[in-house]
Image (spheres, rainbow, N blue to C red):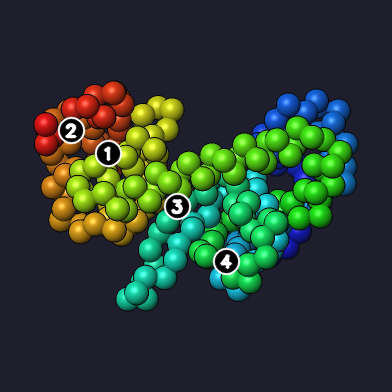
């Protein structure tokens, strides 16, 4: 872990940070003039652990990280992946918790910007739009977590799978998986064989398309209404 200088590429990613939406180029330039340097993490290095984390908003400027937690059997359960442009730590930014609920480690060399609690507060005092952006982001996270609760409590494997595919579908229709299908089964808290059966049924019905290990949802409306069970 070491500080690294800003580059034009890193700056472009930082400028896309949700907190800065609606600010002019000059306002952003002024804010970045007082910002800390990005931090580099090598592959496999811990970014956040349960008891070693920062009260800061982390911004993935480069590389990719993995969010995971330890399962009851000691194995890693992958919760999410964080590509460049992703953020983490928003809930801990102004919290008083003494532990972080998940672990974050670098999947490959990463560059991370940490916006401290004090810096975020200063930004919000100077620009009300930043405070609105933060509230809007947290509201979206609450909705997302409510959907995740529904995924874990619904009894039907296929329903959980459909919700996951719809929630994690990218712009080109590709579903962003947490890793392997086995890791997806762990994430959804369902048996691997049940997941494979439901996935095969959805594929046979045309609701999803598989190309090797990649999964695509070309028609979300069909996936919502045309599940294999129907």
Choose between 112 and 22: the one closer to the eye. 22
Find residue 162 and name its label.
Answer: 1
Choose between 76 and 162: the one closer to the eye. 162
Lower sequence index among marks 1 and 2: 1
Q: Are marks 1 and 4 in contact (CB under 8 Å)?
A: no
Lower sequence index among marks 2 and 4: 4
Q: CA distance from mark 2 to mark 4?
A: 37 Å
Find residue 100 and name its label.
Answer: 4
Is residue 11 among what the camera can see? Answer: no
- Is 81 situated above or below 131? below
Q: Could you classify mark 3 by the number of other residues whose Cα lies within 10 Å: few (under 14), some (14-19), or many (20 or more)?
A: some
Q: Are marks 1 and 2 in contact (CB under 8 Å)?
A: yes
SS type, badge 1:
helix
Q: CA distance from mark 1 to mark 4?
A: 29 Å
- For label 2, the residue is 227
- For label 3, the residue is 80
């Amino acid at each position: 872990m070491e500080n690294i200088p800003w580059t034009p590429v890193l700056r472009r990613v930082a400028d896309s940070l949700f907190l800065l939406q609606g600010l002019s180029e000059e306002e952003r330039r002024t804010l970045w003039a007082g910002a800390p340097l990005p931090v580099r993490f090598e592959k496999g290095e811990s970014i956040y652990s349960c008891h070693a984390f920062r009260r800061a908003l982390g911004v993935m400027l480069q590389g990719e990280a993995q969010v995971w937690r330890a399962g009851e059997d000691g194995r890693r359960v992958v919760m999410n992946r964080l590509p460049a442009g992703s953020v983490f730590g928003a809930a801990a930014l102004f919290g008083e918790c003494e532990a972080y609920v998940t672990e974050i480690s670098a999947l490959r060399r990463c560059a991370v910007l940490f916006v401290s609690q004090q810096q975020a507060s200063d930004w919000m005092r100077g620009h009300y739009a930043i405070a609105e952006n933060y509230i809007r982001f947290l509201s979206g996270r609450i909705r997302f977590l409510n959907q995740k609760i529904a995924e874990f409590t619904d009894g039907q494997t296929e329903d959980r799978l459909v919700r996951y595919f719809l929630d994690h579908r990218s712009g080109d229709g590709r579903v962003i998986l947490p890793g392997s299908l086995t890791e997806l089964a762990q994430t959804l808290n369902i048996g691997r064989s049940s997941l494979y059966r439901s996935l095969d049924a959805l594929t046979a019905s045309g609701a999803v398309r598989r190309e090797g290990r990649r999964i695509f949802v070309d028609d979300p409306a069909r996936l919502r209404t045309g599940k294999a069970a129907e």
